[in-house]
Amino acid sequence: MSLGSSSDVNNWLVRPVRSRLVFLLAFSAFFLVSAGWALALPANGTNDEDEHIIRAYGAASGQLYSSPAAAARGGGAWYSVPRSLLPVNADCAQRWELPASCLQRPPDDPSRTQTATAAGRYNPLYYVPVGIPMVISPNMGGIVVGRLISGAMVAAMLAAAVTIAVRRRSPLLLASLIVAATPNMLNLAGSINPSGLELAAGVLTWTALLALVRARSGELSDRWTGQLLIAAGIGAATLVSIRTLGPLLLGLTVLACTAAARPGRTKELIQRRDSRGVGIGVAVAAVLGIGWTLFSGVLNNPDAQPPPPHLSFVDKISYILADRLTQWTAQIVGRFSYGEVVAPNTMLVVWFGLAFLIIVPTLLFATRRQALLISGIVVTSVVFLVGFEVLYYQHIGWAQQSRYILPFGVGALLFAGSLRRWEFRLGELATRRFVLICGLSVAVMHVWALAVVMTRFQVTQRFKALGALHGSWLPAVGPQIPLLFTAVGGVLIVATIVLSRAPRTSLGGPGAGLGAELPSADATEPATVPADALPLTAGVPAPRS
């Protein structure tokens, strides 16, 4: 097939953005959305943030480890923390469903006092960078800067995943990534909580591994393969280190990606020298993470007091099916603060609708093995959540959340988006429109979700209309700036989609394949021409997987 003249190709190369600009656009988009959350929320505005703030200050101030004690909720540890860091009644808004105006201003007293935290035994890896601003400025200003650092780490991993999708010329994978970055994820990213980084690490690990194992022989350049291995290694090392379930989640992810691999591809990757180097690095991170878990005593917390009511196995399963499954589903998109703020039903329906429009048609057109793998990821995630709930109920009550298993569970959406059969049948124009609809819808809903939560803290939980611009409590920067940051972040999400697309061309015309996959006669095996100008599509229907 003709690729057009050299002059035509050079002209065409000016249009699609290059991978570095894709990364910067995506990073700016996700960072600004998470920054909106960071600026808008009061202290302890997300689940257990006060516990994580104490742990972060301790880790960054050199208190990497504290002896296990019955400090908070019967477990955790004690840390020496400035009195000026947190309000003394940091949980008043959640306990009494009051606006954040109930929070008492912390004293301007930098002297330290021993403070309990239920997060006192957690791995310090995440807490050191986000805690440094609190050591420098032990007040709400330091907390906000720590939140911004957390958001930047999450945004970097999500932007790397988006860049991989663009370089792979996979528009439905890009749509999957945009849908996977839910308000819940970016709310956690813009708070002091390691769950946001854990979720982003899972997304990056899945995206990089799928790009590696789904590539045909010779499709990826040696340099690009090495970069994907590094990206997978960074995601995997982070995932396996920062939370207790990390090794399990990574193991499940690697098993699933191995099952998704093309014949012979796994062996080909293992034989690479850089694969072994990355594998050793991840193994070291895993050993250190598991070592910390065993050494810190994080698994040895005592039973809840008072103990939850005794339930039979049947009663537990019945309650899980009747109530907990619904809560887990809502948590994926948006269940904020301490669970008392839920995203509007319309938002939940639209968000899951976009995800299902990627997953369900893929299941219909995928091979049996691919369909079983997608279904297996979902079923395995639910089984583990149910198992953890049943196993730990008598110790801590109903405490499991879908985000605990989501770094693995998100693979169902990402694997579906990485397959080409639905994209091939949908056609180039319809695929472009669908990805753009995803971006526009998600951009609007990020602002909507933030406005709902701002209303809760500024007015009251009982206020049904949106009231994000007024209230008895307002963010230090005012309510307009967080909303503006999130809105601009949404615009940049759409801009990333639009600017990543190649101009529509026909086969043999200019740009008919620089960096794009050209279908062969049977539209199953693509011929590839490496390039660093990386459009999502190049006027050619994507080949079937």
Image (spheres, rainbow, N blue to C red):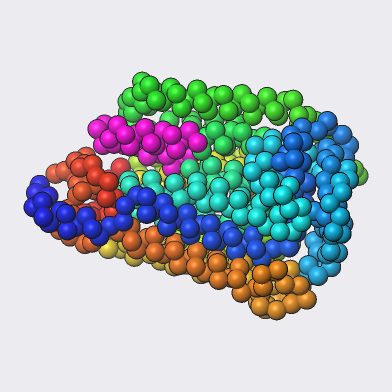
Q: How many marks?
A: 0
Quadrant location of residue 71? top right
The structure residue drawn at horizontal position 71% and vertical position 59%, both measured from the top left corner, is 141
Q: Position of residue 170 (x, y in %)?
A: 33, 50
The structure residue drawn at horizontal position 76% and vertical position 29%, both measured from the top left corner, is 296
**Does the magenta-highlighted stretch encompass residue 112?**
no
Drawn side of residue 14 relative to residue 287, left or right? left
Q: Is residue 1 visible in this depiction of the protein?
A: yes
The structure residue drawn at horizontal position 83% and vertical position 30%, both measured from the top left corner, is 67
Q: State which quarter of the image contains the C terminus.
A: top left
Q: Which residues are magenta?
A: 205-234
Drawn side of residue 61 relative to residue 195, left or right? right
Q: Position of residue 106 (x, y in %)?
A: 84, 60
Characterize the magenta stretch by its predominant secondary structure.
helix
**Does the magenta-highlighted stretch encompass residue 212?**
yes
The structure residue drawn at horizontal position 74% and vertical position 59%, both measured from the top left corner, is 140
Establish if 418 lies above or below 27: above
